[in-house]
């Protein structure tokens, strides 16, 4: 009888030690995979934590009617998620060590939990009853400092990438108007005589597209950091650049420039890979779009013809065959429309302005 109870206790403590050690190792490795690994890997803890917080923020934003109010709330989503992720990791490590301390006989579960938190937060108010407990206590304090240090060192990397991204978004707003539009950008290029030597501009946008692909898949939380101004978004900016490239390739009567086509390909690849990255990890549809209008309006044939006429009136050379230009533009746009729609809904981005806004809007944007 006593032997059976003794053996059961031994088995339970061995299982507790193994489960606690496994939880600690998985949590620390998840932090390393999230913050140190140059490519992002799927971490189940992160996935469920982000999902829960996103549900809370979506429910909160649904209480407000204006996009500006919802935008202010969603601006807190990424920062809150990062801090909450750190807290979740610390709690899991504390629970794992609680099981380990109980397994080696450091007292009841409550006492072990207090001792674990004291060690993790380096308070030192609780003392171990054995040498093994002291050694494990030091290891837990080391891991606690490691997790906090990882987050602190991670933030500068995020904000450096964020700053580089937003610099291009702000510059695009100065060139294409507010809200940005492909037609406004083409008119600005013509008005400033840059359409005659536009290659360097497209090279800069190509590099930006490639950097977006790298940073927004290796640092996925960066996709949710919103622009300082409510009307800006990296999704809207990239969609506008691709709209401009599609309109330039299909409609503007100028010699082919490989740099424009390379920028268009780089943007399509970046959008597709970022969208696929989030689709594979969320395994669900994004929350309902909460922006002011459709995030990626598909222009009708009449809207395209209006854009064609506006380009012609602003002295932009256009091809003679309107229908051929429309068919080519529609084909080019189909390569990235789905990805832009998905990411716009995922990040709650402001709407992209139609390809053919009113003439007054184009003049106002380029004054």
Image (spheres, grey):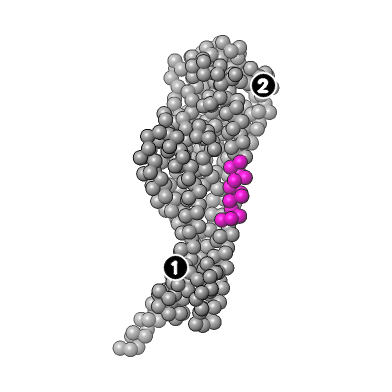
The question of residue 275 being in magenta is answered with no
Residue at the disc numbered 2: 194
The question of residue 155 being in magenta is answered with yes
**Is residue 21 visible to the viewer in this orientation of the structure?**
no
Nearer-the-camera pick, 343 or 3: 343
Name the residue at 41% across, 29% down: 293
Task: Give the Cα distance between marks 1 and 2.
Answer: 61 Å
- Dominant secondary structure of the residues highlighted in magenta in the image: helix
Q: Is the residue 61 above or below the residue 303 in the image?
A: below
Image quarter of the C terminus:
top right
Name the residue at 50% across, 79% down: 128
Nearer-the-camera pick, 283 or 60: 60
* Residue mark closest to the camera, 1 vs 2: 1
Residue at the disc numbered 1: 95
Q: Quadrant of residue 16?
A: bottom left
Image quarter of the N terminus:
bottom left
Where does the magenta region start and end?
151-163
Circle 1 residues within 10 Å: few <14, some 14–19, many ≥20: many
Nearer-the-camera pick, 125 or 23: 125
């Amino acid at each position: 009888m006593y032997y059976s109870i003794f053996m059961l206790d031994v088995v339970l403590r061995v299982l507790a030690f193994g489960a606690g050690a496994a939880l600690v190792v998985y949590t620390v490795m998840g932090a390393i995979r999230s913050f140190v690994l140059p490519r992002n890997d799927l971490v189940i803890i992160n996935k469920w934590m982000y999902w829960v917080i996103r549900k809370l923020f979506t429910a909160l934003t649904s209480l407000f009617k204006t996009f500006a109010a919802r935008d202010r709330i969603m601006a807190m989503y990424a920062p809150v998620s990062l801090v909450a992720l750190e807290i979740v990791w610390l709690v899991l490590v504390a629970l794992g060590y609680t099981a380990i301390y109980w397994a080696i006989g450091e007292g009841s579960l409550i006492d072990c939990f207090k001792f674990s938190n004291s060690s993790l937060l380096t308070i030192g108010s609780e003392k171990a009853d054995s040498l093994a407990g002291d050694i494990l206590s030091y290891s837990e304090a080391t891991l606690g400092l490691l997790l906090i240090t990882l987050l602190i060192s991670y933030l500068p990397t995020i904000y450096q990438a964020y700053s580089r991204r937003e610099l291009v978004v702000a510059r695009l707003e100065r060139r294409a108007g507010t809200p940005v539009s492909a037609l406004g950008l083409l008119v600005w290029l013509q008005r400033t005589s840059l359409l005659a030597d536009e290659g360097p501009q497209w090279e800069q946008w190509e590099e930006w597209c490639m950097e977006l692909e790298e940073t927004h898949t290796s640092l996925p939380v960066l996709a949710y950091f919103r622009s300082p101004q409510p009307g800006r978004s990296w999704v809207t900016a990239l969609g506008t650049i691709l709209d401009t490239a599609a309109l330039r390739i299909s409609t503007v009567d100028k010699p082919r420039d490989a740099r424009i086509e390379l920028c268009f390909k780089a943007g399509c690849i970046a959008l597709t890979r970022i969208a696929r990255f989030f689709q594979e990890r969320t395994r669900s549809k994004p929350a309902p779009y909460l922006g002011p209008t459709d995030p990626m309006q598909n222009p009708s044939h009449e809207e395209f013809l209006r854009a064609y006429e506006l380009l012609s009136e602003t002295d932009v050379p256009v091809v003679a065959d309107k229908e051929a230009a429309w068919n080519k533009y529609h084909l080019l746009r189909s390569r990235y429309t789905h990805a832009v729609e998905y990411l716009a809904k995922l990040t709650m981005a402001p709407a992209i302005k139609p390809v053919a806004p009113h003439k007054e809007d184009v003049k106002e944007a380029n004054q």
